[in-house]
Image (cartoon, grey):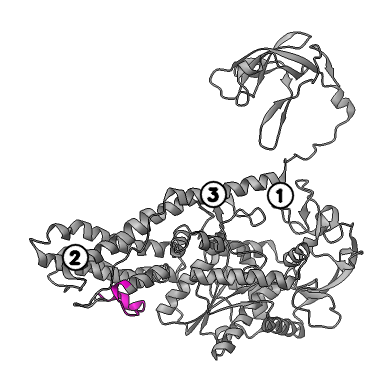
């Protein structure tokens, strides 16, 4: 994927609006906000005119449900989480120019005007359809207000849009035995009118714009998902819904209707830009309506269709807006080999991380970038977090900087020596370090942030290797002039790290800049050889990173284990759904008897199989049973069991098994015998 040659005068960079019904977790950060911040910080250092847009998505059914559950207003819910999210972003150094919210008056005005423009241009189509209605609550039920049995896995708590047990997307009409989440009553179907965006009419244009126009510059995962949607055929999509929380539909006859959250949320980027412009005295329109502006959306893969198909169609239909130049969506980040889940509290929450690991903001930024799910789902583990801090940030980056500054203080009282008398090897190192700004910048411009960070660390490795190979501490007395050259080269690498690390590790870069008393430099300055002039006085050296001990990691891992245990206890035993109904005659064919285990031994070369000799009252027979991981042979001799005696013989590991003992298995996979509670004689029938 190569950057287009077109030159832009300004950049509009948006990041997906986090939903304000919970805090931010590391999946959000890795997927959207850290890469977006790297990109924006780089553009600013290049001297580009850029506005970085963020904000909270504060409408939709999950918020109204949470408000109802907690007995508070939806506004109280979003106020709480908006403040938590905004504060967390600031502390992590996500450098928004504006962080707005969709409950703000300027957003309601902007979204309402946008809808009205499309309405007046006859873009929408009106359709009347049947939707569930709660007669007691006198309210149409949005998908999340309807629960019922999933037709795929029989989960009795599926929602009208998705079953969270099996992950299947649903519609309310798919549910078996639907119930209103408001009253618990059975809802009725009732006619309701809504406005739809006719995506099917946009197929030819979207195919030309995306499939032909962005084949070579959009990420493969983004392009592939868009092409798949278009190839399957697009359908009209409702832009309104029956709800009382959101942007009111600004047309007559739309009482009790609001804009669907997927329609109003991306308009939030525009309203946030307007808010920024009002506060700063800028004109917002060129950032959205001028062809020499570049619009870039940073999102997760679950938002690709909205930002690549639906929102562009909305913008084009309005007529005055530019379209996104790129949408560098990431895949998902898992946590300790399990999918991050807010409902199960299986996450590393940013606000908790900042409280529990103070001063480790850049460590988290580094780990999430180094392990970013750019092309496939990736996994965050606390052990990897520890290893990357100790073995990379501390042992490579921090070690090189500290050694260089300490040695300069020791031999030259912290004054930068002259960069002269270079050997051929020195010249090669100088040439290499001058190339890093271009290399790293190219990776950032192409949205390859993992690659860019790896190159930054390669610059630190170059310095570490150079210092180690030349060993100035060994020749300080015999060849002090050579020591000057070695440390002069090393110090220029340190200065470049202070500049080039800023998009990735802003807190570390600022600390290092203060340590070496380096002025404010832009990106292109880093290509210069002499960032620190001869005779420059350095400041006081300090450690950039500290070792993270096992106890810190064990505490975080235990926190997750406690969460998993709590989830299991809250969920209770998991019971498999009932199997297909059978006739009594089918059951009557089974001959189940009580019996006693007379002998038991492990089947050779197996871990699970026991060879049992059982007195069935009819005979003494051999049965092979897969219970060896649950019971030792000597434990079960004399045990009363229930055995299916008329099961057809089956060879197992060269042993003919004649029957099957009955076992119960719980949700954790533990087995126990189904045994008579009284001392019935062998051969008694189980009916």
Dot 1: what SS?
loop
Mark 2: secondary structure: helix
Q: Nearer the viewer, mark 1 or mark 2?
A: 2
Mark in front: 1 vs 3? 3
Q: Residues within 10 Å of mark 1 (few under 14, many from 20)?
A: some
Graded by Cα atoms within 10 Å as few (under 14), some (14 to 19) or many (20 or more), the crowding at tag 2 reads few
How far from the left and from the top, in percent, is residue 308?
Answer: 61, 70
- Residue wearing tag 1: 165
Q: Is residue 398 left or right of residue 530?
A: right
Q: Which mark is residue 410?
A: 2
Q: How many marks?
A: 3
Q: Label 3 crowding class (10 Å Cα cut-off): few <14, some 14-19, many 20+?
A: some
Asked whether disc 3 touches disc 2, contact meaning CB atoms under 8 Å apart, the reply is no
Question: Of the residues tagged 3 and 2, which is closer to the observer?
Answer: 2
| Residue stretch in magenta | 515-529
Q: Residue 348 appears in which quarter of the rendering?
A: bottom right
* Vertical placement of residue 621 versus 282, above or below: above
Give the x, y percent position of residue 548. Answer: 41, 54
Asked if residue 452 is among those painted magenta in the image, a careful observer would answer: no
Q: Earlier in the sequence, mark 3 or mark 2?
A: 3
Real-space CA distance between mark 1 and mark 3, rounded to the nearest whole angstrom:
20 Å
x then y, percent, for residue 187 = 89, 60
User: Which of the two residues, 129 or 627, is positioned nearer the viewer here?
Assistant: 627
Mark 1 to mark 2: distance in Å? Answer: 63 Å
In this rendering, does residue 150 appear at all?
yes
In the picture, the quarter occupied by the C terminus is top right
Q: Which residue is mark 3?
A: 336
């Amino acid at each position: 994927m190569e950057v287009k040659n077109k030159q832009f005068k300004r950049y509009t960079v948006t990041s997906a609006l986090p939903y304000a019904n919970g805090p931010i977790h590391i999946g959000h950060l890795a997927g959207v906000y850290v890469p977006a911040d790297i990109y924006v910080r780089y553009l600013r250092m290049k001297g580009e005119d850029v506005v970085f847009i963020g904000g909270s998505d504060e409408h939709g059914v999950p918020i109204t449900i949470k408000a109802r559950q907690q007995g508070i207003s939806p506004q109280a819910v979003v106020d709480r989480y908006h403040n938590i999210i905004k504060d967390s972003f600031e502390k992590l150094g996500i450098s928004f120019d504006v962080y707005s919210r969709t409950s703000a008056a300027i957003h309601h005005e902007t979204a309402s005007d946008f809808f009205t423009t499309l309405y007046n241009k006859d873009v929408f189509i009106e359709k009347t359809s049947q939707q569930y209605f709660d007669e007691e609550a006198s309210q149409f039920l949005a998908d999340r207000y309807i629960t019922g049995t999933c037709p795929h896995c029989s989960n009795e708590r599926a929602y009208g849009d998705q079953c969270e047990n099996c992950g299947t997307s649903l519609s309310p009409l798919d549910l078996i035995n639907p119930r209103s989440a408001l009253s618990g009553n059975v809802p009725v179907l009732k006619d309701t009118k809504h406005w739809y965006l006719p995506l099917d009419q946009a197929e030819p244009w979207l195919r030309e714009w995306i499939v032909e126009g962005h084949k070579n510059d959009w990420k493969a995962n983004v392009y592939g998902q868009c092409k798949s949607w278009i190839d399957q055929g697009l359908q009209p999509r409702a832009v309104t819904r029956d709800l009382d929380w959101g942007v009111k539909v600004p047309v007559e006859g739309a009482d009790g209707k609001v804009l669907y959250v997927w329609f109003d949320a991306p308009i939030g980027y525009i309203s946030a830009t307007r808010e920024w412009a009002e506060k700063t005295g800028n004109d917002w329109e060129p950032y959205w309506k001028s062809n020499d502006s570049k619009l870039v959306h940073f999102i997760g893969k679950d938002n690709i269709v909205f930002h690549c198909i639906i929102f562009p169609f909305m913008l084009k239909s309005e007529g005055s807006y530019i379209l996104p130049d790129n949408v560098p969506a990431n895949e998902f980040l898992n946590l300790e080999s399990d999918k991050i889940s807010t409902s199960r509290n299986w996450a590393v929450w940013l606000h908790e991380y900042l409280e529990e690991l103070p001063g480790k903001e850049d460590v988290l930024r580094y780990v999430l970038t180094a392990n970013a799910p750019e092309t496939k789902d990736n996994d965050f583990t606390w052990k990897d977090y520890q290893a990357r801090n100790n073995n990379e940030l501390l042992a490579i980056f921090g070690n090189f900087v500290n050694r260089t500054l300490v040695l300069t203080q020791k031999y030259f009282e912290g004054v930068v020596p002259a960069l002269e008398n270079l050997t051929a090897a020195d010249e090669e190192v100088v040439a290499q370090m001058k190339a890093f700004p271009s290399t790293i910048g190219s990776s950032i411009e192409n949205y390859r942030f993992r690659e860019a960070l790896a190159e930054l660390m390669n610059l630190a490795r170059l310095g570490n290797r150079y210092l180690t190979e030349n060993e100035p501490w060994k020749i300080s007395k015999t060849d002090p002039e050579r020591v000057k050259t070695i440390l002069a080269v090393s110090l220029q690498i340190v200065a470049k790290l202070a500049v080039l690390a800023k998009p990735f590790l802003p807190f570390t870069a600022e600390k290092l800049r203060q340590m070496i008393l380096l002025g404010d430099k832009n990106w292109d300055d880093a290509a210069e050889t002499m960032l620190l002039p001869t005779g420059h006085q350095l400041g006081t050296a300090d450690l950039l990173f500290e070792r993270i001990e096992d106890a810190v990691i064990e505490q975080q891992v235990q926190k997750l284990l406690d969460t998993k245990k709590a989830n299991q206890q809250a969920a209770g035993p998991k019971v498999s759904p009932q199997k297909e109904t059978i006739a009594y005659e089918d059951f009557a064919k089974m001959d189940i008897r009580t019996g006693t285990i007379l002998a038991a031994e492990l089947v050779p070369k197996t871990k699970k199989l026991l060879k049992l000799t059982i007195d069935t009252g009819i005979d003494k027979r051999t049965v092979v049973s897969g219970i060896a991981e649950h019971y030792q042979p000597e434990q079960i001799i004399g045990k009363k069991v229930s055995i299916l005696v008329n099961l057809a013989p089956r060879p197992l590991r060269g042993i003919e098994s004649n029957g099957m003992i009955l076992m119960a298995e719980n949700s954790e996979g533990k087995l126990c015998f189904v045994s008579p509670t009284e001392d019935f004689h062998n051969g008694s029938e189980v009916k």
